[in-house]
Image (cartoon, rainbow, N blue to C red):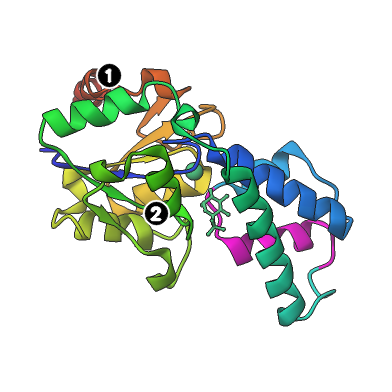
Amino acid sequence: DIKGFVFDLDGVIADTSVYHSKAWHQLADELGVAWSDDLAENLKGVGRMDSLNLILKTGGKENAYTEEEKEKYAAKKNTNYLSLLKNMNASAILPGISDFLKTLEENDYRLSLASASKNSPLVLEQLGLAKYFEKRVDPTTLKHGKPDPEIFARGAEVLGYKPEQCIGIEDAKVGVESINAAGETSVGIGDPKILHEADINFTDTTQLTLANIKAAMKVGEH
Ligand code: G6P
Ligand code: MG
């Protein structure tokens, strides 16, 4: 039986993946690396330094900077990101998410957060959603980023549940891969062509309801 839900944050709970994207786009322009939709997609779910490395690699500049310079650029992106967050409020919560979280709470499911973002506590507070998440995986304690299973495996562990008792929810391809590799049921939010490995796919958060998940899981049993 499913007892826990392990959530990604950016692009699942809130519209913040757009802010991450904007901030990286700005930095890519400064570094002279061409921005593209593919690059934006590939950056979803990827940690801060890994994201910078991916941008540099895309532009053929992987050896252009020292570690120290890279730290500075990563910090610059974060400053940009934080300034975009300043005016964010509950209106950035994606449609249907508040109701979904309430329903999960009413039905005694327990929730943890498996976001690679170091800013996730701030974002949850600012959105007024921190109370729903009993536990959070601290990404600074992880050895590997998504698609490695570590973060989603930990998301179940912190709740005291086995992976098969948990559903993981993600908008990034690497995130769905992480959930699957951890042995949890994966719900992908977004383009089914990109998230084809998800056990259950919804094109957007308005379809993310407990009833829809239960219905999809029943079909999967046969
Ligand atoms: C999430 C987002 C990524 C972001 C990463 C690190 O995975 O999807 O876009 O790069 O977190 O976030 P941070 O806030 O720590 O830079
Ligand atoms: Mg995400």
Q: Which residue lies furthest to the right in this view?
A: 32
Asked if the stretch drawn in magenta spans residue 46, the answer is yes
Dividing the picture into quadrants, the one containing residue 78 is: bottom right
- Label 2 Cα neighbours within 10 Å, binned few <14 / some 14-19 / many ≥20: some
Asked if disc 1 and disc 2 are in contact, CB closer than 8 Å, the reply is no
In the depicted structure, whether residue 132 falls above or below residue 117: above
Secondary structure found at label 1: helix
Q: Position of residue 156 (x, y in %)?
A: 23, 54
Q: Position of residue 45 (x, y in %)?
A: 52, 50
Q: Position of residue 71 (x, y in %)?
A: 68, 74
The circle drawn on residue 212 is 1
In the depicted structure, whether residue 10 falls above or below residue 71: above
* Residue sitting nearer the eye, 202 or 197: 202
4 left or right of 117 in image: left
152 left or right of 24 in image: left
Q: Main secondary structure of the magenta part?
A: helix
* Boundaries of the magenta span: 45-61
Dividing the picture into quadrants, the one containing residue 214 is: top left
Check disc 1 and give the amino acid type: Asn
- Label 1 Cα neighbours within 10 Å, binned few <14 / some 14-19 / many ≥20: few
What residue would you read off at disc 2?
121
In the depicted structure, whether residue 114 falls above or below residue 10: below
189 left or right of 129 in image: right
Q: Which residue lies furthest to the front in this view?
A: 87
Q: Position of residue 165 (x, y in %)?
A: 16, 45
In what quadrant of the picture does the C terminus appear? top left
Residue depicted at 70% across the width and 43% down the height? 22
Residue depicted at 35% across the width and 33% down the height? 199
